[in-house]
Image (spheres, rainbow, N blue to C red):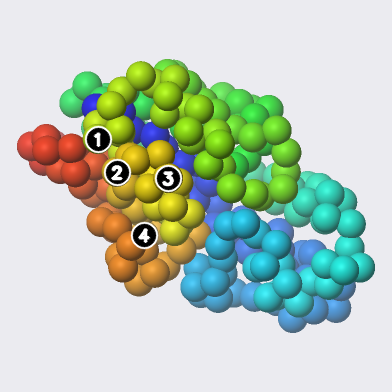
Amino acid sequence: MTILWDWNGTLLDDTLSAVDALNEMLSKRGLAPIDAGFYRANFAFPVRPFYEAIGVDLDNEDWDALAREYHEAYRRRRPGLNEDAVAALEQAKRRGARQAIVSALRQDLLDEETSRLGVRGYFEKIRGTDNLDGKSKLDCAAELAAAMQDIPSRIVFIGDSLHDKEVADAVGAKCVLFGGGSHSPERLRAAAPTGDSLPDAVELAFAACGENTLQRE
């Protein structure tokens, strides 16, 4: 069995950091701030429509510069791991799951963050993008799923967004979602099995592949 983890909002507890970074940008433009509830109810990939929804005039903004501004503001917050991330990774490791990361984050930043937070050793492969655009990670996921050399029915994506379900469907894999990240659990439960914690999501992932559920220690 192979688990492909999403990074931002799933293993990385960065939803509030994202909201704070966006509000810094909105303040500079004289726009109203947003709160975490609005973000979790509306954020989606690709991110351009979300920026328009919060009032950013993309017709008069340079998108690449806007992406750099966001990431500079976001990186100053230095978010940490979800409190259950290591427990969930250990849980999957004990059961013999192979683990990898697929993310829309730029590859060099993904490598830096997984090393900084001490979890790089859990993963056979870590696959990010070559840009800051916040576009779909479908191509990355397809390449990574093929590289892991497991049959699709034995691959489970664990993520925190509806886009993770779209990606899993596109490559023929299973999907389990985590309700503590960028999307509200109400949005996610309509699309796929959803765990309230990362260890719960791991249990659901094993169940999706026909494995016995994990035993809590």
Q: Earlier in the sequence, mark 4 or mark 2?
A: 2
Residue at x 42% of width, y 29% of height: 145
Tell me, for residue 153, which label it has, or none.
Answer: 1
209 to the left or right of 51: left
Q: Quadrant of residue 11?
A: top left
Q: Which is more N-terminal, label 1 or label 3?
A: 1
Q: Secondary structure at mark 2?
A: strand
Alpha carbon of mark 4 to alpha carbon of mark 2: how far? Answer: 17 Å
Q: Residues within 10 Å of mark 2 (few under 14, many from 20)?
A: many
For the point 48% across and 33% down, which residue is it? 142
Note whether residue 84 is visible. Answer: no
Q: Are marks 3 and 1 in contact (CB under 8 Å)?
A: no
Residue type highlighted by circle 1: Ser
**Looking at the rendering, in which quadrant would you find the N terminus?**
top left
Q: Nearer the viewer, residue 156 or 12?
A: 156
- Alpha carbon distance from label 1 to label 2: 7 Å
Which x, y percent locates residue 167?
A: 45, 46
Report which residue position mark 2 lands on: 174
Q: Are marks 1 and 4 in contact (CB under 8 Å)?
A: no
Residue on which disc 3 sits = 170
Q: Are marks 1 and 2 in contact (CB under 8 Å)?
A: yes
Q: Secondary structure at mark 1?
A: helix
Work out which residue is located at the far bottom of the displayed protein and give it: 32
Are there few (<14), some (14-19), or many (20+) residues within 10 Å of tag 3?
A: few
Query: Mark 4: which secondary structure?
Result: loop
**102 relative to 69, above or below:** above
Which one is in front, 169 or 157? 169
Q: Which mark is residue 179?
A: 4
